[in-house]
Image (spheres, rainbow, N blue to C red):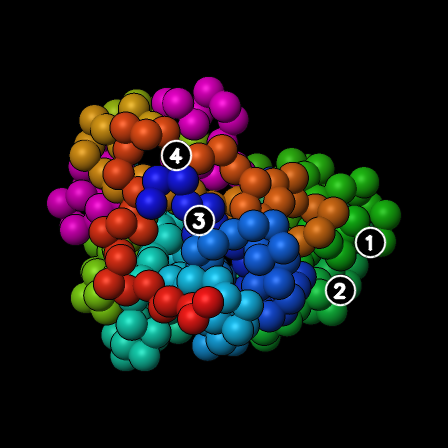
Amino acid sequence: MHLLNADLHCHSNVSDGTLSPAALAERAHAGGVELWSLTDHDEIGGQARAREAALDLGMDYLTGTEISVSFAGQTVHIVGLGFDADDEQLAQGLEHTRAGRRVRALQMAEGLAQVGIPGAFEGALQYVGNPELISRTHFARFLVETGVCPDTHSVFRRYLTEGHPGYVPTHWAKLGDAVRWITQAGGIAVIAHPGRYRFTPTEEYALFTEFIAHGGRGVEVMTGSHSAAEHIRYADTAVEFELLASRGSDFHAPGESRTELGTLPDLPGRLKPVWEALAARIHTAVR
Ligand code: AMP
Ligand code: MN
Ligand code: MN
Ligand code: MN
């Protein structure tokens, strides 16, 4: 099971990816993925299509989502895997988490208009696949397409992060709520890309201990968001906190994402893969 090619983190056009769930399934399968999960931000509207496409291709499937959480003044992402996609409390929690995105986007556009970039709300909307899920990524694509910045990374650096004109602070879900929505629906909660956050050691320790106290059980070790050094560092963290380890590319779009589906290094042998604990929750393809 260790050497299974599992890719348990990516995005479709139901959130801020550009491919449909079915097209992503094909890309994952072509990349050699054997166990796949679509983890759209704050949304599970693509789950049925992703699961059906995966099973048709002979690829095993776990349900997934990536919940936006506010913790210690920063945004933290919590991936949920293997939950019941029909769970009512999870659906309501995600709906509540999505609710502020439209107003936030209008405020972002106001900030951009003040520095001479008009029409960003309408511009970003052109890239949105799901009206409830307008994200900074859609603004970034618009600003690249109109020549304001050469690539999405520089848009984030110059306009969409704290201290810049298109940044609007947001209250996302509470850590304990996100973990509870996932676990009470039969899934496992996983801290996404811990290397991305800018926490002090004390804050990071608080994140892990509070996450575990709320019932969280996993951490992403192998992710497209980590450097080689962070792969090692968070493998140690998984051991230290006795957490299950996950692996996922965080693929968003061809030409935009550096890490292709299914191409990350395997989890180190000393870690316990999250998919072993979710064996009973896997939708298994007939091969
Ligand atoms: P939002 O949920 O609207 O705040 O948007 C967050 C999304 O923006 C993340 O899931 C990433 O896809 C994307 N993102 C965040 N930071 C960067 C960055 N520095 N470069 C490119 N994309 C980023
Ligand atoms: Mn994203
Ligand atoms: Mn994320
Ligand atoms: Mn992601």
Whether residues under marks 2 and 1 lie with C-beta atoms below 8 angstroms apart, the answer is yes
- For marks 2 and 1, the one nearer the N-term is 2
Q: Residue 211, relative to residue 87: is it above or below?
A: above
- For marks 4 and 2, the one nearer the N-term is 2
At 60% from the left and 50% from the top, the residue drawn is: 31
Distance of mark 3 from mark 4, alpha carbons? 10 Å
Compare residues 257 and 277 and report the one nearer the observer.
277
- For marks 3 and 4, the one nearer the N-term is 3
Distance of mark 3 from mark 2, alpha carbons? 36 Å
Q: Tag on residue 145?
A: 1
At 74% from the left and 69% from the top, the residue drawn is: 126
x then y, percent, for residue 163: 57, 37
- For marks 3 and 1, the one nearer the N-term is 3
Compare residues 149 and 120 and report the one nearer the observer.
149
Question: Pointer 2: what residue?
Answer: 123
x then y, percent, for residue 177: 24, 59
| Residue at mark 1: C-beta within 8 A of ligand 1 | no
- For marks 1 and 4, the one nearer the N-term is 1
